[in-house]
């Protein structure tokens, strides 16, 4: 029912029992030093793909790539414990997995979920005039880079970890309650990269309100100081031909200056891990949807709207 043609977050296949299956897999390398936190982040990140399709994850398989000649097995125990904790919080059973000796540590999940008839979200089902609501703050890529460089404050690191280990389950359920028709989770391609998949799949354009983006603590300061992962720079170069400034100025692969709008645009391209959901909801439901998301403790905000055209216009 849904394949990879428009870069959706997961595949959806029809199941004769009446509820369709949602299938995904995701593996990441460590962003943080604490192995249990890494396991929880990796699991939360993988589970998110199912919620982004409007479904609920049910079962998971661990995918482990571990240098057992370099790290003690207790590190792997902690990673798996963190993943199990996230899965338990989501009501997902970990039913097995596979491990590989690998010089580079990686961990993730293969996840099977289900989605009810009529509840499926896709990059192809957005509608003209809908509001774009982002449920989590941006900046995990930049803060992760700052952590690796020893530049992140404890407050910024803890805020990033808390965000990355927050399940998108609640956000998805609120989205269903307010009639969301399409969604994606904002991960490796950044906000603009994942929005590009929606506008391409639904044959629409979009306006993005950069001053409305929710940001993690210190993310703006770090990117102003030049702390930016390679993936985020690649994302900006990728979306540049598809985006333009609202005043008609061309959007470029490299920032032309250190202005606030250029910094915010780069943050909109930041490669996220376990980011929030980007929900497409009717404009007259947006305020109520945001209020309910904030009641869950999420820093949700309307970050744009869908319109006619083929461009992503930056305001």
Image (spheres, rainbow, N blue to C red):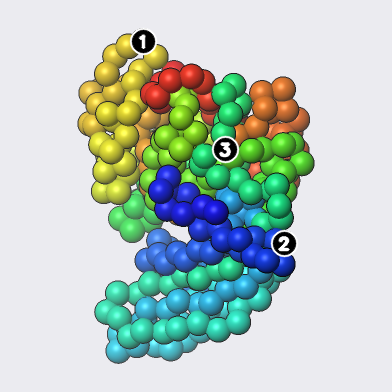
What numbered label is drawn on residue 247? 1
Whether residue 56 is visible to the viewer of this picture, yes or no, is no
Task: First in sequence, mark 1 or 2: give its number.
Answer: 2
Q: Which residue is mark 3?
A: 125
Q: Residue furthest front?
A: 16
Task: First in sequence, mark 3 or 2: give its number.
Answer: 2
- Pointer 1: residues within 10 angstroms few (<14), some, or many (20+)? few
Quarter of the figure with residue 129: top right
**Kind of element beneath mark 3:** loop
Quarter of the figure with residue 59: bottom right
Q: Nearer the viewer, mark 3 or mark 1?
A: 3
What numbered label is drawn on residue 18? 2
**Residue positioned 36% across, 84% down in the render:** 100
Query: Could you tell me residue 229's position as x and y percent?
Result: 30, 48
Q: Nearer the viewer, mark 3 or mark 2?
A: 2
Query: How far apart in space, not on screen, are marks 1 and 2 (Cα)?
Result: 49 Å
**Residue positioned 67% across, 57% down in the render:** 115
Query: Could you tell me residue 114's position as x and y percent?
Result: 66, 62
**Kind of element beneath mark 2:** loop
Quarter of the figure with residue 242: top left
């Amino acid at each position: 029912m849904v394949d990879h043609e428009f870069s959706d977050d997961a595949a959806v296949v029809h199941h004769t029992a009446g509820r369709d299956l949602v299938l995904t897999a995701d593996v990441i390398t460590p962003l943080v030093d604490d192995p249990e936190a890494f396991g929880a982040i990796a699991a939360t990140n993988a589970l998110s793909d199912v919620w982004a399709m409007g479904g609920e994850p049910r079962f998971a398989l661990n995918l482990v790539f571990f240098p057992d000649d370099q790290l003690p097995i207790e590190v792997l125990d902690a990673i798996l414990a963190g993943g199990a904790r996230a899965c338990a919080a989501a009501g997902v059973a970990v039913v097995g997995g596979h491990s590989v000796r690998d010089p580079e540590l990686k961990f993730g999940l293969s996840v099977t979920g289900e989605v009810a008839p009529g509840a499926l979200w896709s990059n192809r089902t957005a509608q003209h005039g809908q509001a774009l609501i982002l449920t989590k703050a941006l900046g995990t890529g930049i803060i992760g880079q700052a952590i690796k460089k020893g530049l992140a404050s404890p407050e910024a690191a803890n805020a990033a970890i808390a965000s990355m280990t927050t399940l998108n389950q609640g956000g998805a359920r609120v989205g269903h309650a307010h009639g969301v028709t399409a969604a994606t989770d904002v991960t490796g391609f950044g906000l603009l990269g994942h929005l590009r998949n929606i506008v391409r799949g639904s044959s629409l354009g979009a306006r993005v309100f950069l001053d409305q983006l929710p940001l993690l603590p210190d993310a703006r300061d770090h990117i102003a100081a030049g702390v930016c992962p390679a993936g985020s720079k690649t994302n900006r170069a990728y979306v540049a031909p598809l985006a333009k400034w609202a005043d008609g100025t061309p959007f470029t692969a490299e920032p032309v200056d250190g202005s606030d709008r250029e910094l915010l645009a780069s943050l909109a391209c930041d490669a996220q891990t376990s980011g929030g959901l980007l929900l497409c909801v009717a404009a007259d439901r947006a305020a109520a949807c945001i209020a309910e998301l904030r009641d869950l403790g999420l820093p949700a905000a309307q970050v744009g709207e869908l319109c006619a055209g083929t461009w992503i216009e930056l305001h």
